[in-house]
Amino acid sequence: MVDSYSNFLILYHLSSYSIPKLQEALINIFALYGTPSIIVFDNFPSFVSPLFKQFLIEHNVVPMYCIKYDHRSNGHIETLNSFVRNSISKFMAEKESFSNAVSRTLLKNHTSVYRDNLTSQQIFFNDPDFHAEAVIRYTPQLHIIDKPVLFKMKADQSTWTEGFATYRIGKNTYQVIDKEKSIHIIKDNLINFDIGKDIIKEVVDVISISKPSEYRNVKTSVDSIDSVCTESTPNIIVSNNEEREELTSDMLTKYKAFRHHYSILQYHGSTKGLKDEPSSGIGYFAHIQSEMACGGLHLFNPVSSDLAEVCAFVMALENVKDIESPILFLTDSSYVYKTIANGYINRLTSLDRPHHEMWSRIKLLYRPSYRIIQTASHSRHSPVGNKIADYVARAYSLNFPNQPHFSLNYDLDHKNVFKEIKSKFLTFEMKHNIKIG
């Protein structure tokens, strides 16, 4: 196990992966290091068993699941797994016993500088505010689905299996229960929601009504956290609000109030440079009342993707600070969205936090009348406005446009506006013999 914030490694030798052995190991770990708020597992059978999940819930631990061997979901622990294997092998090659090799591996991890000139051990034991930032950066979002589906375990399978999707984990992973009540973690390309009414009724009758109570317990344990603090994790506050729903391309049509009552502004940060050289830029697309515009800035020094997104949000807020009407902000940045939607912004304005000056400015400019929603990222399901903001940010990252603002034809829909923007930037592409994207 690894603490996602401090990189503090915990090793426990198991004789098997049986549930009693896993429970014994976790009880010992909880006793030594405290009970974590969330543990992210892959879909190993013991981890997804109802009995093991019930054990975690009884200890006030929220279990979350991800695809194994996927750097986008559990890359942190996979990196540590590689480190542990190589380190133990090295020490045992030097004639150390297995027990000593494990101890020396742990010591190496705990005493190595991780960030801010501090070791993993120093950060793990001496940072009382690490909970909120860890939640912002490392926990996948959990959306209740509860829909009958067809799914398959591998892409090359010719037949589909009937199941019931209970949750969407993050953007492209689903937890599915089959007719035997087994749990599967499935990527979105292996699941089909478009099924006939006869199959829907059959799946619901067999699976939904007879689902064991532990599934309801898991959902209750997550959904009922409405600004809750527990004694074991006093610094975590998760607000339960309606802004958690991810926005896809059809939602602006589905929720017409967004168009009628809000001005819409999408922004993006990019770190794509010319010929793979480090470079950063930020861009926005705004549809505010009866006007549409896009623009951005080239950042003089290359920055991280997180900082690029924060800079883009500051620019967007600065551009609309004189507009009195409510504004809906769309972002594909989980870092920015979770900070605003979950109320963690106060923690990130403290002096020891990354980008605290930017977050202080955001706190000053962000109004109660604003709303922020997370969009699908780099996906065909993304709203067109988000694709425009992404495209414009990449253009400014390449330092193409020579002006910070472009007025657009309001009479066009967003798809045709996108074509208009591409035509404006065509000169830059031809001059540098490169395609923006």
Image (tube, grey):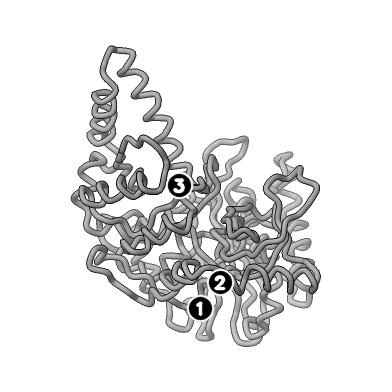
Residue 69 pos. (x, y %): 54, 40
What amino acid is at disc 1? Answer: Glu
Residue 406 pos. (x, y %): 66, 65
Residue 348 in view here: no
Q: Residue tagged by mark 3?
A: 303
**Disc 3 and disc 2 in contact, CB within 8 angstroms:** no
Q: Residue at x 31, y 59 (%)?
A: 131
**Disc 1 and disc 2 in contact, CB within 8 angstroms:** yes
Give whichever of 401, 262 is nearer the camera.
262
Residue 18 in view here: yes
What amino acid is at disc 3? Answer: Val
Marks 3, 2: nearer the viewer: 2
Residue 415 pos. (x, y %): 77, 66
**Left or right for 81, reference 332:** left
**Left or right for 94, reference 18:** left
- Quadrant of residue 222 within the rendered picture: bottom left
Q: Residue at x 62, y 67 (%)?
A: 285
Circle on res. 242: 1
Sequence order check: which comes first, mark 3 or mark 2? Answer: 2
Give whichever of 129, 105 is nearer the camera.
105
